[in-house]
Image (spheres, grey):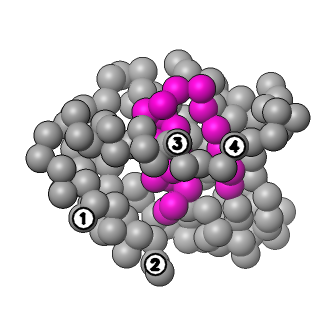
Amino acid sequence: MSTDQVQQEIIDEFSLFDDWMDRYQYLIDLGKKLPPLDPAEKTEDRLLDGCQSRVWLVSEGDASSLHFRAASDAAIVSGLIALILRIYSGRSAEDILATEPKFIKAIGLSQHLSPTRANGLDAMLRAIRNVATSAQQAG
């Protein structure tokens, strides 16, 4: 499935909910389904700057296929991680860098996230793009 198809799938899922309390609950439920990181993976060098909550990002692979795993100590942020990983994990560096996160505006996240959560979301996206850029340059 292409990144555009995955984003459309996310947009369609969120359109099933009429109010934002239901959408937040859905985000929380998605976050609960994330596979946990091993405690040994929760190191300072994997901790993202710019997030109010603690977010660890683990990346593996090379320019042809990058895989990401992540965890947060905050429920809604964990849900955001689940969405981002659905779109970007398992993609080539080229695909990652070419994919704008259109779903954020389309589902209304940009209007309904607190400024600190929005900054954290931007930090996660930036970190994934940085990994993709580094992989491309090393490739």
Label 3 environment density (alpha carbons within 10 Å; few <14, some 14–19, many ≥20): some
Alpha carbons under labels 4 and 3: distance apart: 9 Å
Q: Position of residue 47 (x, y in %)?
A: 71, 29
Alpha carbons under labels 2 and 4: distance apart: 26 Å
Q: Answer with mark 2 or mark 4, whichever residue precedes in sequence.
A: 2
Of the numbered discs in the image, which one, if any, rests on residue 130?
A: none
Of discs 1 and 2, which sits in the foreground?
Answer: 1
Q: Residue at x 51, y 61 (%)?
A: 86
Q: Position of residue 12 (x, y in %)?
A: 24, 64
**Residue assigned mark 1:** 12
**Residue assigned mark 4:** 36
Q: Secondary structure at mark 2?
A: loop
| Magenta region | 68-87
Q: Quadrant of the C terminus?
A: bottom right
Q: Position of residue 68 (x, y in %)?
A: 68, 55
Q: Answer with mark 1 or mark 4, whichever residue precedes in sequence.
A: 1
- Given the image, on which type of amino acid does mark 1 rest? Asp
**Residue assigned mark 3:** 32
Question: CB of mark 3 within 8 Å of CB of mark 1?
Answer: no
